Image: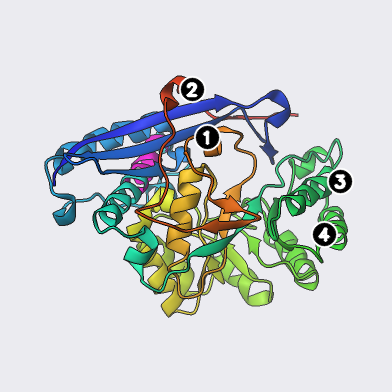
Amino acid sequence: MKITNIETICLSRMHEIENQWKTFNVKTLKADVAIVVVSTDSDIIGIGEACAYGNPTFIKIWIDKFAPEIIGKDPREIEFLPHPVGFTMEHFNKKNDDFLRGHDSAVGGLDCAIWDLKAKINNTSVSKLISPKSKDSMKVYASSGVRYDWREDPNQLIEETKSYIDLGFSATKVRIGTKWTWDNVTTDKFIGLMRDLSSEVGKKMNLMVDGNCNLNIEQATKIAKELEKLNFLWFEEPINKDDIEGYIQLNASVDMPISGGEQLTTLAQFVPYIDKRAYDIVQPDVGEAGITECLRISKYAENNGIKVIPHSWHNGLMVVASAHFASSLSNPQFVEMCMVQGPLQWDILKEYPIKSGVISIEGPGLGVNLAENLTKKFPYIEGNYFVDVVR
Ligand SMILES: [Mg+2]
């Protein structure tokens, strides 16, 4: 068998105005997808979703650069596959950061597609190819809390969370809302909202908070101590992602599990955070780093007593790949699913493998197939998926 072609399918869908989600000072306009398809001279293909944070057009450029080295090879005997290089950390916020970030996303999508292909050739699932002990299903948590506006009605967050109970989810992750300085939001005000949320839904679902790197250490410490009392499961990226000393200090001073790492793509980047106990939970992303690198990261983390709960904030194919990876861990916990991506999220696939907040992990490969006529239904729309809001 030989690989005959590698292509990148770029897709988009504009959000309706009422479905534009927001967090801090950012408002989204559309949902993007980048899918890597690896064809062979048999009828078997491999598919993998690259994290669209890398910008689909840049991901396509990188995949086109990688392709000549891989086309013509037998997928069972591939020697060359590109590795993530950690551009997202070193080059984030620098010139051309999106183009560089696209490199690792392209690697992530390609790596997932090759795993899909190899598992299909072996007539097994990706999860069982990783480990025969992998679970056949996983709990999925509803990841959102990006619709409420402190200036309008913060209690919308509680109503939204209740709607996920109705859909059968047993866990949800919320965010810290629109930019606090716009509306004089204080840690006490936020803690008040978390108390109300916990008292309304805490008996029916597990709760987590993502600070999206927007708090300072004093705010984060105060909030972490309260979240611990309210039995939240983890507090994600509360402070600047690069402030490793801050994370070490915070993690040592609170019992609340602190998580992070969604923007790191290599084991080398994770090592100091793990060695210095900056996080209790690491959150690598298969669409940004690939399953292969996520396995290296998870092995190192688990050997050092750190939990792994993967990050996944895009579309259905990434949720599925994330589930295959997560189910192989020695202590599988949750799979993350973004709740605000709109119909594009699952319309890219023929299957919807989630029922009552649980995902079935099946083969062959990743166990899912691309829907027909995707480029006609969701043609790619140029431009950034978000805008900065000024108030
Ligand atoms: Mg996060």
Amino acid on which disc 1 is placed: Asp
Residue at 56% across, 68% down: 333
Helix, strand or loop for disc 4: helix
Q: Earlier in the sequence, mark 3 or mark 4?
A: 3
Q: Tell which of 85 and 247 is nearer to you.
A: 85
Asked if residue 381 can be seen in this view, the reply is no
Q: Which mark is residue 377?
A: 2
User: Would you name the residue on which mark 3 appears?
Assistant: 155
**Range of magenta residues:** 98-108
Q: Residues within 10 Å of mark 1 (few under 14, many from 20)?
A: some
Q: Any atom of ligand 1 within 8 Å of the CB at mark 2?
A: no
Q: Any atom of ligand 1 within 8 Å of the CB at mark 1?
A: no
Helix, strand or loop for disc 2: helix
Q: What is the x, y in percent for residue 279?
A: 55, 69
Q: What is the x, y in percent for residue 195?
A: 86, 61
Q: How far apart are labels 3 and 4 at the CA level? A: 13 Å
Q: Earlier in the sequence, mark 2 or mark 4?
A: 4
* Position of the C terminus by quadrant: top right
Image: 365 above or below 10 = below
User: Would you name the residue on which mark 4 appears?
Assistant: 201
Q: Nearer the viewer, mark 2 or mark 4?
A: 2
Q: Earlier in the sequence, mark 3 or mark 1?
A: 3
Q: Is residue 234 left or right of residue 325?
A: right
Q: Any atom of ligand 1 within 8 Å of the CB at mark 4?
A: no
Q: Earlier in the sequence, mark 2 or mark 3?
A: 3
Q: State yes or no: discs 1 and 2 in contact (Cβ < 8 Å).
A: yes
Task: Examine the residues drawn in magenta and state their main secondary structure.
Answer: helix
Image: 159 above or below 270 = above
Q: How far apart are labels 2 and 4 at the CA level? A: 38 Å
